[in-house]
């Protein structure tokens, strides 16, 4: 099965840059996704890396290295509203077991942005 | 533009009672999911439906049943609620393709407490 590891908490100040790492163990997957969840809210899609390298979407960037089984989410110019939990997720590539084709999520990283 | 709608939003059950969580999506997605999220943890897959008429067990299916009523609706039933099922339940949907299936859309969540 899949296993994803993330730090449980990260703290940073407004205007700073923060990197949230995700390491994973899976035999094959379609790519690495990132989701944001504010307290009491639903997870929302942030970014997806199908291939190795960096994907940039405004202040957020995401990186994937399949050879290192590693990815990260980079948040720049941090704002107070970025305080939330961030989850990495993968979708297993194996066929024949459709239950595994849903996303598997890491346990999440709680980001606290301080003034 | 409703997206994924789930009801009820809050529910308190007594141990042994049964209930059904309802979910509907208006995005014409083939795949639908039920996840649960316990405090400070990631999302764990309960059941998954790749298309109308098919359902598959996820990571934590025990104590639950599901029904994919049609393409829009995917319900989750607790036959005999237990305190261990106290959680936040999220319904979600996505396209069933290799890359876009990594972008899933969540409902607002259902807070269930079993006493």
Image: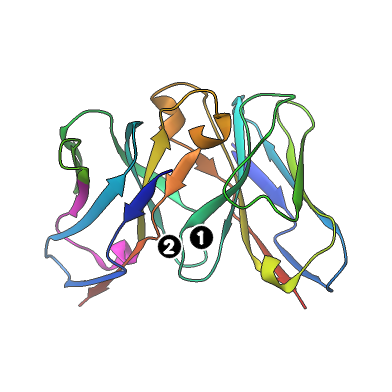
Residue B115 left/right relative to B93:
right
Q: Residue at 29% of width from left, 62% of height from top? A: A82
Could you tell me residue B111's position as x and y percent?
A: 66, 65
Q: Mark 1: few, some, or many residues within 10 Å (few <14, many ≥20)? A: few
The magenta region covers: A71-84
Residue B71 left/right relative to B59:
right
Q: Which mark is residue A54?
A: none
Q: Chain of mark 2?
A: A
Q: Nearer the viewer, residue A64 or A29?
A: A29
Query: Do discs 1 and 2 share a chain?
Result: yes
Could you tell me residue A98's position as x and y percent?
A: 56, 29
Task: Reply yes or no: does residue B69 show up in magenta.
Answer: no
- Asked if marks 1 and 2 touch (Cβ < 8 Å), the reply is yes
- Whether residue B61 appears in this view of the structure is yes
Q: Residue at 54% of width from left, 23% of height from top? A: A96
Q: Which mark is residue A38?
A: 2
Residue B51 left/right relative to A69:
right
Could you tell me residue A112's position as x and y percent?
A: 28, 72
Could you tell me residue B39's position as x and y percent?
A: 52, 71
Per the image, the residue denoted by label 1 is: A41
Q: Mark 2: few, some, or many residues within 10 Å (few <14, many ≥20)? A: some
């Amino acid at each position: 099965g899949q296993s994803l590891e993330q730090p449980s908490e990260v703290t940073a100040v407004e205007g700073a840059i923060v990197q949230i790492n995700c390491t994973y163990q899976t035999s094959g997957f379609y790519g690495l996704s990132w989701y944001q969840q504010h307290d009491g809210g639903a997870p929302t899609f942030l970014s997806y890396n199908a291939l190795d390298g960096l994907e940039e979407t405004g202040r957020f960037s995401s990186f994937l290295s399949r050879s290192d089984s590693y990815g990260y989410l980079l948040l720049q110019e941090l704002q107070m509203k970025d305080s939330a939990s961030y989850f990495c997720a993968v979708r297993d590539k194996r066929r024949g077991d459709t239950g595994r084709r849903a996303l598997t999520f890491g346990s999440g990283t709680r980001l606290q942005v301080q003034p | 533009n409703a997206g994924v709608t789930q009801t009820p939003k809050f529910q308190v059950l007594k141990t042994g009672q049964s209930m059904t969580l309802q979910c509907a999506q208006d995005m014409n997605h083939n795949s639908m999911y039920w996840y649960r999220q316990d405090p400070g943890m990631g999302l764990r897959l309960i059941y998954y439906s790749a298309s109308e008429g098919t359902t598959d067990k996820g990571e934590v299916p025990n104590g639950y049943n599901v029904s994919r009523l049609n393409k829009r609706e995917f319900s989750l039933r607790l036959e005999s609620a237990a305190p261990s099922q106290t959680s936040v339940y999220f319904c979600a949907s996505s396209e069933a393709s290799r890359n876009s299936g990594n972008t899933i859309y969540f409902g607002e969540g259902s807070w269930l407490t079993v006493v």
